[in-house]
Amino acid sequence: MSNTSTTAGNGTNSAGATAPDLSFGNFQAALGFNGILSIIVVLAFVLVRRHFPSTYASRLFMVPKKLLPPDLTAGLLKIFVSDADLLEKCGHDAFAAIFYSKTLAILFTAIGVPALIILLPINATGGNGLAGLNLLGMGNVADERKLWAHFLFAVYAIALTLYAIFRIINESVRLRVLYQRGVDLAQRTLMVRDVPEDWRDEKTITDIFNRITADGVEDVIIPAVVPRSHAHVSKAHLVARNKLEAAVSVYFSRIARQFKQGSDPNDESASSNHTSTEDSSAKLRPSHKVPMITGSKVDSITEHAKQFQETQKKLAALQAKEGLARVSTVFVVFREPFQAHLVSRSIVHSTPWVMGHKLPGVYPEDIIWSNANVTYFNREWRFLMTQLIIFAMIIFWGAIVALVLTLTELGRLQEMLPFLRSYLEMYPQIAKLVSGILPPVIVSVLLSLVPPILRALSAFGGSPLQSFTEQQVLSTYFGFQLINVFAVNIVGASILTSFNEIKDKPSSVLNILAKSIPQSANFFIQFLLVRGLTAPSLELIQASRLIVGPIMMWLTGKTPRSMFVARTPPAFMYAESVAGHGLTVTIGLVYCILSPIVLVFVVAYFWLYTTVYTYMMQYVYRTKRSTGGKFLFTAANHMFVGVFLMEFMIFAIFILSQNIPIAILMILVVAVTLWSYSQAKRFMGIIETIPVASLAGKDTSDTGGIHFSAKWTSFLFPSVANAQIARGISLDESTHVEIEVGGGGVITRLRSAAQAYSDPEFGNLDLKVWIPKCSIGTVTADVAGEIVGDCRTVVPSQVVCFGAGLDAKGGVVISSGNYSEMEKL
């Protein structure tokens, strides 16, 4: 058989065919580039962090003083606080993300250190004649007796992983129980879909559910179907409000700038020129043309106040109409959260899909209102369509990934672009860098395009809640990556690249595949170098927010509302993050035996993300829709995929190499894993509802999972062992409130269920006009009176100045620590 020439430092296997090998030169170039880039980015973060608090401490704006994280003036090491503080100050989902990455970091450290000490020397001296990084893989072991060490280590890794899975499940249960025991309006509310049309009245629904809960129903909300004309008026009402706020803010800003130039409203002598001050202030009122360009000028405040009053009257008339059709989704408020969970488990109708989908603990801002009136069978065919689209996407993305990996192989690039050949020959280090960086970067970019599409498909398929959508995206995206990154590369590296050798020696197909499968780790080393070193540092530096954020604030921050939007911290979308971590877990587990060098980068990946999350969750991110750590349970189940794939790959290699005794023992290991998986699935009911024992004040922290002794637990998992964390209620899970400002005071009151659970397109007659407070004379009171006017539907409490003011240059400023109140304005 003729030897095939290799490109830029690639090695060859013992048979002389080209091996899919990442040479040490390529590896060093990729490691050096990603390492240096990460160090530069982190150093840049350390240098610029204090100078851009709106980017690197944006969450401090929304946090009340009692929940502020540690001051970092003394150093970044203060980000490491106790688990109790993290839970209290960051909330359930943020704490769950940190807990998950920290647990995995400890797990892979416990697997990786022994693997590097025991397995690497065995592999390196295996005698199979492989080169490059393949020398360190299991495929280089020729002596079958040495494979017993790999089998025993596999049992150790699997046992430790199963323990970690149940620790994560245990924590997920604890967080969910704490979360679901909340007593606010949302936790007591049950969302019921597919209610029959003749049952859509408050008395019928109350009678049905009171039979289950013994007069537990407190309120029933059945939203109306909003006609298109009604929605148009509601939208016009919002537009008029926003324009009015902008006009008033411009007016007050001009006044503030003018008085900075010599007019002090607090000066006692100012009363003598009170008239001239009023005259000068009147000239500062903004104006615009109606119609635009060709019309005559009108006073902007007067015109927009008139439009706001008119749309308010129209909206009041439309809301007063009777006989509107009602949506098929009903919201039932119970007196206690447990009653909502109890009813969610009941069967209401003899037809299974009628009122069969019931969701407890629903927050109003989490509802996807466009799906509130979609029928069951409509959702079913939509769901079928989305699954077909996702299946087509998997095939399409898989083909693209395979094609890109083929085209970005250095030899292929030189064939397609001949001018590169001489250049790369002159600069071999560039060639090594391209080989080590380009493929994983392109794959990562392609994969980043998928989550937004999956979210849109989930909403189209009839998802009732945005948090429900995130759960669907988490599972779907994990499977998507598993196929398009893991499976495609396994097939490409292990089978396609060995095709010529198999064709020449078909009788040796089993031995050839047994050698080539461990060598497929080379791409994943490249992949983890990019994902494990560069990605966490880029998430920390937030380059796009650093550049675009100040520009957008300068362009749009002209009103308290727009300033509030500009200062709102970015939301942590856990679906793509946790799905990516799940893929790394799978890679780490599968290759911890086949190519232990991979564990170095898996360990670095999770420790870096633990550090980044610990900072970002306290100082930058907000959790937009809390699930009480529900995604932890999904992530733990995804870890079983990695365990099963690991066992299958090891079993397949031992079968291919005709090592029957170890293959038989692996079947027993698989059986134990299957039993563990069946036990883990039993926790699903606890995740979805409240255990009765917790309501009786009994300790439910011990979920009956797999436990080691306290000594071993403390040694292996110090961050998760014997966790006695008090319940923490984050700002994102606080009671819904509305703010009224009257006479300079602030009145906080609970939002009624009817207001909370109504379609936003129905409109809000209590819509707030949020303006900055101007301390010049009585202009604030005068403008507020002008906005209310003689319109009976606009009341003085709708004009608010809460937390908003002006600086000396006329710029709008808003206070910190009042995010939950401002969010309701």
Image (cartoon, grey):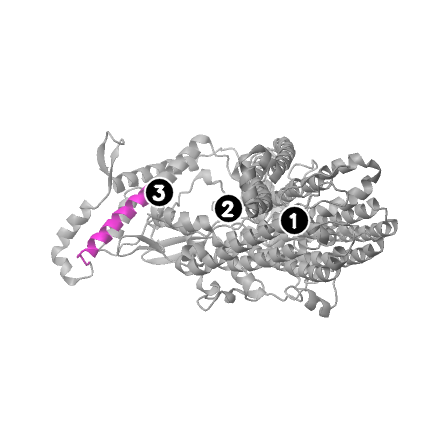
Q: Which residue is mark 3?
A: 242
Q: Is 617 drawn above or below residue 9 in the view shown?
A: below
Is residue 253 found inside the magenta-colored segment of the image? yes
Quadrant assignment, res 327:
top right
On the image, the x and y values in percent for residue 375 come to 60, 33
Residue 365's mark?
2
Cα gap from disc 3 to disc 2, whole angstroms: 20 Å
Magenta residue span: 243-264
Cα gap from disc 2 to disc 1, whole angstroms: 52 Å
Looking at marks 2 and 1 on the same chain, the residue that comes earlier in the sequence is marked by 1
Element at badge 3? Answer: helix
How crowded pointer 1 is (Cα within 10 Å; few <14, some 14-19, many 20+) is rated as many
User: Is 17 positioned to the left or the right of 749 in the image?
Assistant: right
Looking at marks 3 and 2 on the same chain, the residue that comes earlier in the sequence is marked by 3
On the image, the x and y values in percent for residue 382 come to 61, 32
Element at badge 2? Answer: helix
Along the line of sight, the residue nearer the viewer: 116 or 167: 116
Q: Three-letter amino acid code at disc 3? A: Asn
Q: Nearer the viewer, mark 2 or mark 1?
A: 1
User: Is 654 positioned to the left or the right of 373 in the image?
Assistant: right
Element at badge 1? Answer: loop
Q: Main secondary structure of the magenta part?
A: helix
Q: Which residue is mark 1?
A: 23
Residue furthest bottom as drawn? 711
Residue at point 82%, 36% (across, down): 506
Residue furthest left as drawn? 272
Is residue 160 found inside the magenta-colored segment of the image? no
